[in-house]
Image: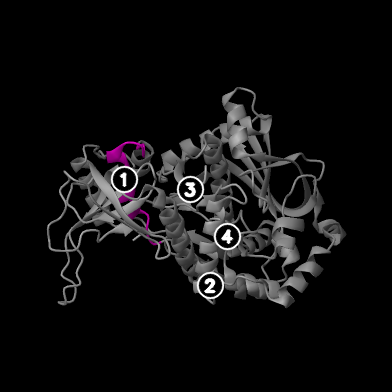
């Protein structure tokens, strides 16, 4: 199933945290040269100089909105705060002011910080640290929308009708001041208790409306939890963390803004879209057959987004289907265009079921900075500069290459954390849900083919693993954790006694967590 970034919640100084930190250090050493770790001296110097800039000195082109009580909503530990919001109910619907960190104010186009950011592409979130896109004096300092700090921002003004549809789009540069740093878990607890922050009550209301509109247009998302690593009493435990409803509502606000950005760029013929082609018909047909076999049929006339929203990952057959549904979410890329004739033939991001652009996380993702700049020109009735238009074409390749490197490192880090955590369970037997089945392969005629095997999902601890055995997708089987090799990032599961292990002459234990 789809993996999300792992976060380490181990208490500082605990043995588990120290061991994992050493493992991540070794992993980073192995990837030396693939992912930039330290910032060059000239980049750090440029960042220090940029941090001293006075946004208020910009004059008439930047509006003073410091009297508007913006709030941020993030994980409690976050300090690189890209977004702040101010929500209002109006006679016709809603008014959304969505402030996005003005990274371009601090990062000159074609300057040394810009070039370093293109080399990095995005902030990497590893189990015990993050490798930032920009120097921390910017990303966690003056450019971040921290509470009680006056900061420059791009402010989207989105006018919504009573159904939550966007009927008006504005964008300008401004000075903003967040009055509160709100955290997901605390906000959800207060909402559940009936005394939530007024802005969060309104956010949930708007989020619910946007979710309904998503269903109407055929949008879809995979309802999968986040994997977390928790250290308790000297050992490490993996667990699932489900998204809070307020997090889903917050995500809808970001999606809405990305759709607004895409509409501006398509209207004016220049920008960068986040695209995804529709699922191939054979993949759709195959998934529909799989749903029938698993006894949870995807019926004709039901949009696949609606069907996926009906699935609960805690149910074994639903979990298998959510894993299989990843075949419908492939081919995401970026499409840059500088003239109307270069607009992609199909600009729709299929999972969202609408044109969409990344625009709300410029502190953490390279492409958002360029989308914000070109959208500002469009909104203000200006033609983007030739320098900006030339840069647009370079960003998709930068995002693709850096994204692949980051993905490899994050995957290896996740495997390290999983195997380190699993060491405490070596020799134990677990119930697991079969989420995929593969026939044996012959290899290249040298006996190196893979055996008949299934991929299983354990619920506690929450890992996936390939096991040499045979079972139908969606069934619950018993597997045993036979060996764990933390330095090699490999945990080997086998069929437990009484399960139908594949008898093909392959050594037992030919599958492993993270393989």
Q: Which residue is mark 2?
A: 29
Observer-side mark, 4 or 2, equals 2
* Mark sitting earlier along the chain (3/2): 2
User: Could you tell me which secondary element the residue under label 1 belongs to?
Assistant: loop
**SS category of the residue bearing label 2:** helix
Crowd tier of the residue under label 2, counting other residues whose Cα lies within 10 Å: few below 14, some 14–19, many 20 or above:
few
Residue receiving disc 1: 428
Q: Which residues are magenta?
A: 311-331
**Point 61% across, 55% down: residue:** 361
Q: Earlier in the sequence, mark 4 or mark 3?
A: 3
Q: Which residue is mark 3?
A: 236
Q: Residues within 10 Å of mark 1 (few under 14, many from 20)?
A: few
Q: Is residue 257 above or below residue 207?
A: below
Q: Residues within 10 Å of mark 4 (few under 14, many from 20)?
A: many
Q: Which mark is residue 265?
A: 4
Where on the picture, by quarter, is residue 186?
top right
Would you say residue 321 sits in the magenta stretch? yes
Q: Position of residue 390 (x, y in %)?
A: 61, 75
Please indicate, yes or no, whether residue 404 appears anywhere in the rendered image.
yes
Q: Where residue 35 sits: x, y (%)?
A: 54, 71
Q: Residue at x 33, y 49 (%)?
A: 323
């Amino acid at each position: 199933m789809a993996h999300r970034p792992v976060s380490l919640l181990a208490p500082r100084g605990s043995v588990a945290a120290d061991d994992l930190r050493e493992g991540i250090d070794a992993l980073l050493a192995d990837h030396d040269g693939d992912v930039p770790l330290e910032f060059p001296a000239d980049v750090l110097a440029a960042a220090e100089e940029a941090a001293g800039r006075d946004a208020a000195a910009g004059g008439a082109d930047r509006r003073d909105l410091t009297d508007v009580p913006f709030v941020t909503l993030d994980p409690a530990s976050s300090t690189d705060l890209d977004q702040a919001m101010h929500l209002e109910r109006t006679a016709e619907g809603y008014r959304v002011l969505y402030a996005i960190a003005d990274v371009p104010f601090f990062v000159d186009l074609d300057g040394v910080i810009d070039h370093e950011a293109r080399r990095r592409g995005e902030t990497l979130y590893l189990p015990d640290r993050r490798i930032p896109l920009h120097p921390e004096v910017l990303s966690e300092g003056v450019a971040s929308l921290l509470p009680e700090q006056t900061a420059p921002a791009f402010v989207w003004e989105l006018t919504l009708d009573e159904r939550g549809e966007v009927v008006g789009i504005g964008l300008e540069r401004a000075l903003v001041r967040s009055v509160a740093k709100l955290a997901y878990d605390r906000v959800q607890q207060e909402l559940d208790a009936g005394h939530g922050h007024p802005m969060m009550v309104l956010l949930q209301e708007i989020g619910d409306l946007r979710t309904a509109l998503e269903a109407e247009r055929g949008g879809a998302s995979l309802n999968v939890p986040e994997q977390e690593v928790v250290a308790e009493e000297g050992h490490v435990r993996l667990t699932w963390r489900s998204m809070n409803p307020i997090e889903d509502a917050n995500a809808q606000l970001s999606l809405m803004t990305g759709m607004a950005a895409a509409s501006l760029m398509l209207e004016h013929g220049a920008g960068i879209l986040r695209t995804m082609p529709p699922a191939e018909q054979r993949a759709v047909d195959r998934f529909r057959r799989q749903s029938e076999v698993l006894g949870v049929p995807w019926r004709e006339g039901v949009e696949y987004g609606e069907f996926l929203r009906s699935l609960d990952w805690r149910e074994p057959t639903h979990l298998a289907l959510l894993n299989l549904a990843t075949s419908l979410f492939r081919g995401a890329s970026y499409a840059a265009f500088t003239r109307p004739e270069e607009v992609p033939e199909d600009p729709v991001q299929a999972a969202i079921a609408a044109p969409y652009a990344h625009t709300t996380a410029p502190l953490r993702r390279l492409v958002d900075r360029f989308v914000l700049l070109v959208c500002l020109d469009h909104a203000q009735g200006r033609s983007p500069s030739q320098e900006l238009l030339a840069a647009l074409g370079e960003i998709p390749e930068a995002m693709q290459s850096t994204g692949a490197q980051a993905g490899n490192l994050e995957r290896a880090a996740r495997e390290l954390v999983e195997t380190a955590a699993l060491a405490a369970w070596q020799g134990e037997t677990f119930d697991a849900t079969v989420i995929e089945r593969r026939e044996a392969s012959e290899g290249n005629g040298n006996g190196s083919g893979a055996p008949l095997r299934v991929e299983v999902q354990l619920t506690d601890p929450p890992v996936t693993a390939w096991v040499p055995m045979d079972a139908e997708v969606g069934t619950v089987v018993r597997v045993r954790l036979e060996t764990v090799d933390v330095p090699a990032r490999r945990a080997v599961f086998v069929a437990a006694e009484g399960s139908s292990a594949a008898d093909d002459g392959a050594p037992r234990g030919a599958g492993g967590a993270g393989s």
